[in-house]
């Protein structure tokens, strides 16, 4: 069978639901892909700026608060002041921290799967996931999409111990970087 490497490439950052001071109600905010950096003498504050989808009002997601400039890695500080997109996205995908600040985080985002096939001499089908950001995508959702089978059929394969996850986690958990899934001896019955 084969080894398939799948890189999960988000097409957008998650939006958040929180109170908008201008709209006077809970609304959706999107990531502006900009940092706000303030310094008071040697102390630095950094936020990611979010904008309301209705009125363009802003909310600042705190990243650093009152940190001495000497305690910030110089490369990271440069990324803050230059609005480095990859760094902003890394913070925008920190759903656990966002949930502490917001009513809800909409993690149902558009993504692309970039596939690389490597032929191996094996009766098994192996899939490895790569992702730069912390994504809230469930393993069973993406795996059923890739394999073209229902989640109930996927669950049956798991119960029959025909699916092995490394690291060994529940198939309903979130996809993590470098997660490897092996479908034992079933590769010929699954079209990929």
Image (spheres, rainbow, N blue to C red):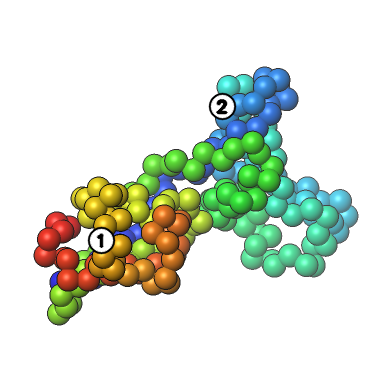
Give whichever of 97, 41 is nearer the camera: 97
Residue identifier under label 1: 157
Left or right: 186, with 134 as reference point: left
Q: Residues within 10 Å of mark 2 (few under 14, many from 20)?
A: some
Left or right: 63, with 1 as reference point: right
Mark 2 or 1 closer to N-term?
A: 2
Q: Residues within 10 Å of mark 1 (few under 14, many from 20)?
A: some
Secondary structure at numbered mark 2:
loop
Q: Is residue 104 visible?
A: yes
Q: Looking at the picture, how far across and down is residue 2, in whole percent?
A: 19, 70
Left or right: 122, with 33 as reference point: left
Which residue shows up at 35% across the image and 53% down it? Answer: 140
Q: Looking at the picture, how far across and down is residue 174, in whole percent?
A: 45, 56
Which residue shows up at 70% across the image and 52% down it? Answer: 63
| Residue 131 in which image quadrant | bottom left
Give whichever of 154, 111 is nearer the camera: 154
Q: Residue furthest left?
A: 188
Label at residue 53: 2
Label at residue 73: none
As displayed, is residue 47 above or below residue 132? above
């Amino acid at each position: 069978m084969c080894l398939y490497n799948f890189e999960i490439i988000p097409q957008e950052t998650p939006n958040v639901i929180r109170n908008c001071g201008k709209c006077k109600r809970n609304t959706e905010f999107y990531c502006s892909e900009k940092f706000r950096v303030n310094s008071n003498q040697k102390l630095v504050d950094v936020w990611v700026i979010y904008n309301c989808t209705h009125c363009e009002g802003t909310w600042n997601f705190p990243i650093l608060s009152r940190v001495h400039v000497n305690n910030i890695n110089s490369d990271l500080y440069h990324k803050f002041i230059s609005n480095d997109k990859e760094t902003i996205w890394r913070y925008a995908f920190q759903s656990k921290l966002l949930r502490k600040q917001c009513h809800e985080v909409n993690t149902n985002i558009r993504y692309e799967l970039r596939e690389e096939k490597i032929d191996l001499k094996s009766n098994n089908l192996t899939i490895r996931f790569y992702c730069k950001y912390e994504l809230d995508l469930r393993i069973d959702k993406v795996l059923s999409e890739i394999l073209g089978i229902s989640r109930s059929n996927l669950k049956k394969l798991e119960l029959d111990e025909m699916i092995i996850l490394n690291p060994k986690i529940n198939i309903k958990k979130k996809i993590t970087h470098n997660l490897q899934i092996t479908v034992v001896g079933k590769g010929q019955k699954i079209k990929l």
